[in-house]
Image (cartoon, grey):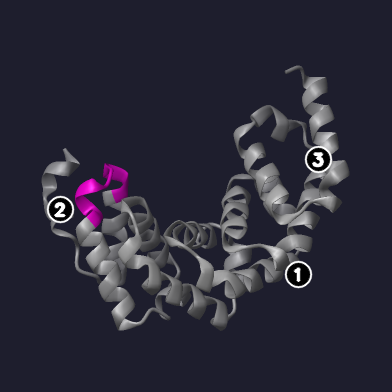
């Protein structure tokens, strides 16, 4: 597509942002993470409009909408910068509200975003961390290798979240890491190793085998 057409699409996003519903917000943001030309054509007003749409729809977001929105904000610095402090507070409240509905992927994506978005991490409440910790314990046994490595790495740099995990949650997470470690990529094993070391958890046997480093 030509630059004028990308500009036309981004103008449409700016014009319609105030009418967007949660799924439309996260779909638009995630599209912009994949379309460099479209993201480059966005104006400051466009990013501000999308940030306002995030803030406006946060209270209606379901867990999947929230995780996808967080994921996109991690990759779109201009959108992240346009979210206001009250907007981050609204997103943190959405974490607290939706934590009990999260599936393993939502849990991992949300933790991953919180360890990258300082404003979001700073806006989290004790109840929000507790809800997210409960979600980790509830979903750990269903996590795949990517969910496990992402969650462990994030928990290693989110002490407020790690502090809320119960002994049984840690047990389930350790068991999931042991089960899924053989399926992990080299990067996943590195993330798991760093997380386990920071959290003083048992390192899975498959990761202790140094052959995978070669």
The label on residue 103 is none
Residue receiving disc 1: 86
Cα distance between the residues tagged 1 and 3: 22 Å
Q: Which of the image's four quarters has the N terminus?
A: top right
Residue 180: image quadrant is bottom left
Residue receiving disc 2: 206
Of residues 212 and 181, which is closer to you in this image?
181
Residue 10: image quadrant is top right
Q: Is residue 150 left or right of residue 130?
A: left
Q: Secondary structure at mark 1?
A: helix
Cα distance between the residues tagged 3 and 2: 47 Å
The label on residue 13 is 3
Instruction: State which mark lies toward you, 3 or 2.
Output: 3
Q: Secondary structure at mark 2?
A: helix
Residue stretch rendered in magenta on the structure: 180-188
Q: Residue at 62% of width from left, 56% of height from top?
A: 65
Earlier residue among tags 3 and 2: 3
Q: Residue at 26% of width from left, 43% of height from top?
A: 186
Residue contact between numbered discs 3 and 2, judged by CB atoms under 8 Å = no
Q: Residue at 65% of width from left, 38% of height from top?
A: 31
Seen from this angle, which residue lies furthest right? 15
Q: Is residue 30 left or right of residue 179?
A: right
Residue 60, position in %: x, y?
A: 71, 65
Q: Is residue 136 left or right of residue 29?
A: left
Earlier residue among tags 1 and 2: 1
Of residues 20 and 129, which is closer to you in this image?
20
Q: Secondary structure at mark 3?
A: helix
Residue 54, position in %: x, y?
A: 73, 57
Q: Which of the image's four quarters has the C terminus?
A: top left
Q: Residues within 10 Å of mark 3 (few under 14, many from 20)?
A: many
Please tell me whether residue 15 is drawn above or below residue 88 in the rendered image: above
Earlier residue among tags 1 and 3: 3
């Amino acid at each position: 597509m030509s630059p004028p057409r990308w500009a036309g699409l981004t103008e449409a996003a700016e014009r319609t942002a105030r009418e967007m519903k949660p799924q439309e917000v996260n779909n638009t943001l995630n599209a912009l993470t994949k379309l460099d030309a479209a993201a480059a054509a966005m104006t400051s007003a466009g990013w501000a409009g999308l940030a306002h749409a995030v803030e406006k729809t946060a209270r209606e977001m379901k867990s999947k909408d929230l995780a996808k929105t967080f994921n996109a904000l991690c990759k779109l610095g201009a959108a992240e910068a346009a979210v206001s402090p009250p907007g981050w507070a609204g997103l943190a409240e959405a974490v607290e509200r939706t934590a009990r509905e999260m599936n393993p992927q939502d849990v991992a994506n949300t933790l991953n975003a919180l360890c990258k978005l300082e404003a979001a991490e700073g806006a989290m409440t004790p109840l929000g961390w507790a809800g997210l910790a409960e979600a980790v314990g509830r979903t750990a046994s269903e996590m795949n290798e990517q969910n496990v490595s992402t969650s462990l790495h994030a928990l290693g740099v989110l002490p407020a979240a790690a502090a809320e995990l119960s002994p049984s949650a840690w047990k389930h997470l350790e068991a999931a890491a042991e089960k899924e470690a053989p399926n992990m990529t080299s990067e996943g094993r590195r993330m798991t190793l760093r997380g386990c070391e920071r959290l003083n958890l048992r390192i899975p046997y498959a990761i202790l085998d140094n052959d995978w480093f070669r």
